[in-house]
Image (cartoon, helix red, strand yellow):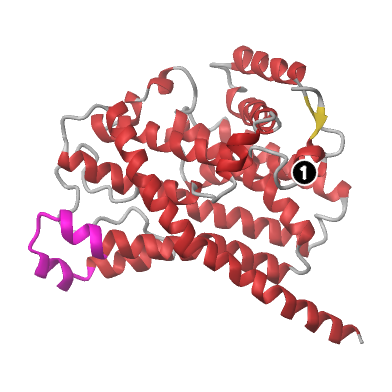
Amino acid sequence: MLSVPLSAILGRGNNNFDLVRVAAAASVIVSHAFAQVHGTAAAEPLASLSVYTLGQHAVNIFFLLSGLLVSASLDRTPSLAAFATSRILRIFPGLIVCAIVVAFILGPIVTTHDVGAFFTSPAPYFYVLGTVALVSVGAPLPGVFDALPEAGAVNTPLWTLKYEVLVYAALVIVAALGIWRRPVMFWLFFFFLVVFHAAVEVNHDHPNDHLMLDHLARFMLCFFLGTAAYRLRTWLRLSPYGALLAVALLVITNGTVFEESIGYGAIGYLVLCFAALPMTRLRMISARGDISYGLYIYGWPVAQSVLLIAPELGPIALAAVSLAVASLLAVGSWRLIERPALDLKRIAAPRRARMLLLART
């Protein structure tokens, strides 16, 4: 890879961002397989080598890439209302269908309770409402996965979605207040996030000890690191030398109080370097559809179901089978739910443009 500015790879077809997102979603499934088999996240190999597990690193990457790409979307979108609509259409249609599928198709199949009692219980209905409202994504379903090591955990990864919505809302507020368009104000805001994260970081011993405030500090910093990269896109160069420096920083800060904050930036830079690699064939395959979100929201319940059928599976085998099944569901989610939902904003865009033109005449 030659040295290139970040701006050179931001165009559609010039990067491997779709591939990175799929790899990150797959990493979450692989990482969670260890917890699902052994009943603890500490069983994941990377947990003893890094402050974060593989899955946690992958989620950090999701937020950083989201900050980068959503910032580009913000610059292209004619209004904040249109921008917010786009974000809603990206998250909620797929989530709504997933919650319904898990509660009313998967639940009755795997429950140890009477099926009639399952449907007459209020729990499945509250599960759907709570999941879609992002207030109780960890809610159990009657008799579902009760006998597994991660007992009663229906779809654990969904807890991060509320933070995704919060960082989107923060970006909307930053734009509405004029901070986004004023470089000095934006960098002051970013400096505040760095200080906020540092203040929160010194008050806990491990990322898994985090409360909501800790998670918010982590995801806000990761997301706005992505927005900062977008702001610096014309001079932020991606090069082998920069990648070597990022690796050196990861090694030097491993096990220190700087591991988290330095790791966000260093790993993020490495991800951007990977995204710049000329991988034409893989780009063509991944460009056929963004299945990363579907993998993320279906991966856990699929793995739990596989473990019910084959409890003797080890983490690697469980991850492999789960990835295969979740990929099929993710393709269906993309083609039948997510892409049609995103098409709605393209249909509405010409109408908004005509209204703006009439308003100006």
Q: Residue at x 71, y 73 (%)?
A: 349
- The image quadrant where one finds the C terminus is bottom right
Image coordinates of residue 117 in percent, x first then y, are 10, 68
Which residue appears farthest toward the left when viewing the image? 114
Q: Quadrant of residue 217?
A: top right
Q: Amino acid at mark 1?
A: Tyr
Nearer to us in this view, 278 or 357: 278
Q: Residue at x 16, y 34 (%)?
A: 311
Q: Residue at x 46, y 64 (%)?
A: 337
Task: Determine whether, in the image, residue 227 is placed left or right of residue 323.
Answer: right
Which residue appears farthest toward the right when viewing the image? 361
Which region is colored magenta? Answer: 104-122
Nearer to us in this view, 245 or 187: 245
Residue 110 magenta-drawn?
A: yes
Does 97 sit above or below residue 10? below
Classify mark 1: residues with Cα within 10 Å, few (<14), some (14-19) or many (20+): many
- The image quadrant where one finds the N terminus is top right
Residue 237 magenta-drawn?
A: no
Does 133 sit above or below residue 200? below
Nearer to us in this view, 274 or 96: 274
